[in-house]
Amino acid sequence: MDSLREIEESKSLRNLGYDIFYLRKTFSTMDFAKEALEFGKYFRAIIVAEEQVRGRGRKGRKWFSPKGGLWVTIVTPIPKDKLELVSIIAGLAVILSLRELYGLNVQLKWPNDIVYLGFKLGGVLVENIIYGNEIVSLIGIGINCNNSSLDLGIGGTISLREILGRSISRKKVLEKVVINLERLLRKYSTPEIVETYKKHCFSLGKKVKVKLNEEIIEGFVCDITNKGGLVIRTSRKDRIIIDHGDVLEHEGVKYKLS
Ligand code: BTN
């Protein structure tokens, strides 16, 4: 197994002002991050665990987090103009990093599932906390790295080791992700972020079925708005914008959506 513990000594992350917490086992790095923020006021921190026993996914789902994966929460202040786009930015930081490191065609299924050929490789969960004038984001990232997707007990998932046929360095992946995250948060404009997202969006052009309030909408994804919303063209040729609905069916996806 690669040595994730070495992340504690990472010069590039320390130079960016991050405190680093390496944990062998925790309930969830999200919960640990919240406590660290409350008790120690760590506004810039990286919490990484070898294993989570109560990992959380989006929409209250359970997130299986066995040894070998990269399970991390990055705590960072967010510029106000980027607040609506944080989860898209985090997803982009991951896929750009995996593309740069391994030349893989990794994409984002709206809003921020990390997919490879329709298989789920990872995901992003963002929780924001307001402190006076500051907004601090807890950016939870899970990437199947050196673990076997079979250990997850969910069909349609995949790991980097399975794609590449070898183990990878989670330290390298994490360093790259944080560097890209900083770049996207502090140097990119909103239009640049949305343009980059569109380039790597698995959902564009695909047929989807979405539940919005109590209505089911079916159509093709034809665009992404400046706030990261999905634009769907229905068979009646209406254009409908979805900011938060549940995607029930998505063409090309190999895992179960719920
Ligand atoms: C998703 O549902 O796709 C998002 C999954 C996010 C999982 C990561 S793993 C590290 C962090 N800690 C958690 O409990 N969840 C996030």
Image (cartoon, rainbow, N blue to C red):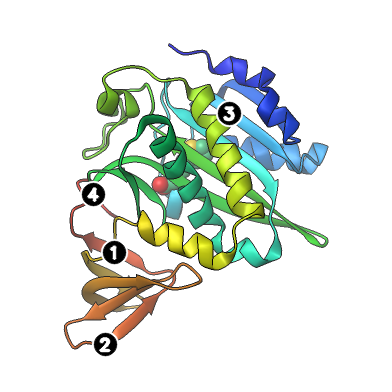
| Of marks 1 and 3, the one in the foreground | 1
Question: Looking at the image, do the residues carrying marks 2 and 4 touch, with CB atoms under 8 Å apart?
Answer: no
Query: Which picture quadrant has residue 182?
Result: top right
Quadrant for the C terminus, please.
Answer: bottom left
> Residue visible at 22% across and 81% down?
234
Q: Which mark is residue 256?
A: 4
Question: Looking at the image, do the residues carrying marks 3 and 2 touch, with CB atoms under 8 Å apart?
Answer: no
> Residue visible at 73% across and 28% down?
14
**Residue at which label 1 appears:** 204
Marks 2 and 4, the one that precedes in the sequence: 2
Callout 1: 10 Å neighbours few (<14), some, many (20+)? many
Q: What is the spatial separation of the Cα atoms under label 3 and label 4, in whole angstroms?
A: 27 Å
Label 2 SS: loop
Query: Which picture quadrant has residue 215?
Result: bottom left
Q: Which mark is residue 238?
A: 2
Q: What is the spatial separation of the Cα atoms under label 1 and label 4, in whole angstroms?
A: 19 Å
Q: Amino acid at mark 2?
A: Asp
Marks 1 and 4, the one that precedes in the sequence: 1
| Of marks 2 and 1, the one in the foreground | 1
Q: Amino acid at mark 3?
A: Val
In the rendering, at what x and y percent does residue 77 appear? 72, 51
| Of marks 1 and 4, the one in the foreground | 1
Q: Amino acid at mark 4?
A: Lys
**Residue at which label 3 appears:** 48
